[in-house]
Image (spheres, rainbow, N blue to C red):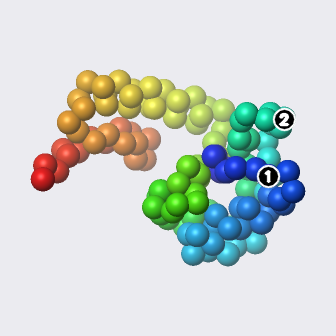
Amino acid sequence: MIFGLPEDDDEVIQSSVSHVFEELGEKPRLEAVHLGKKVQSKMRPVKVTLSSSSIVHQLLSSSSKLRQSVKYKTVFLAPDRTEEERAKHRELVLHLKERTEAEPRRRHYIRNGEIVSVELNKK
């Protein structure tokens, strides 16, 4: 799943997704489709189907590189989740936000279905 990818009326979604993956140094064969109805003020998520799970894992692990990209700074990759997985992840994110407010001097993130906290380096 890709979130935050701007969509143009005249652009083919496959080429947009290919450009994002090229930014990560990958050129896999893919199928891509927007989910939901088109609304002028919102960006629709994109469901991407790839040929193998190893490519998916490789793209997800290198997706943090998009934050350094000027063009794709607001684009995020996420695995396709079942309804149960989405509910569990939503709950984790709520706990993550609570912990971030309670302990602002620590960095908090989700890894392998758990919230991890580390001390921020003071310079």
Give the image location of residue 19, x and y in percent: 68, 68
Name the residue carrying label 1: 8
* Relative height, residue 7 to residue 92 (above, below): below
- What kind of residue is marked 2? Lys
Residue drawn at the location 20% of the way across and 36% of the way down? 105
Residue 25 sits in quarter? bottom right
Give the image location of residue 22, x and y in percent: 63, 72
* Relative height, residue 54 to residue 109 (above, below): below
Residue drawn at the location 84% of the way across and 60% of the way down? 12
Q: Is residue 80 left or right of residue 108?
A: right
Tell me which numbered mark, 2 or 1, is placed earlier along the sequence: 1
Residue drawn at the location 53% of the way across and 54% of the way down? 73
- Give the number of the disc on residue 72: none
Mark nearest the camera among 2 and 1 is: 1
Report the front residue among 81 and 94. Answer: 94
Give the image location of residue 91, x and y in percent: 48, 27
Q: Is residue 108 visible?
A: yes
State the CA–CA distance, disc 2 to disc 1. 14 Å
What is the total number of numbered labels drawn onto the structure image? 2
Q: Is residue 12 left or right of residue 117?
A: right
Name the residue carrying label 2: 37
Q: Is residue 92 left or right of residue 3?
A: left
Residue drawn at the location 35% of the way across and 38% of the way down? 115
- What kind of residue is marked 1? Asp
Report the front residue among 41 and 60. Answer: 41
Secondary structure beneath disc 1?
loop
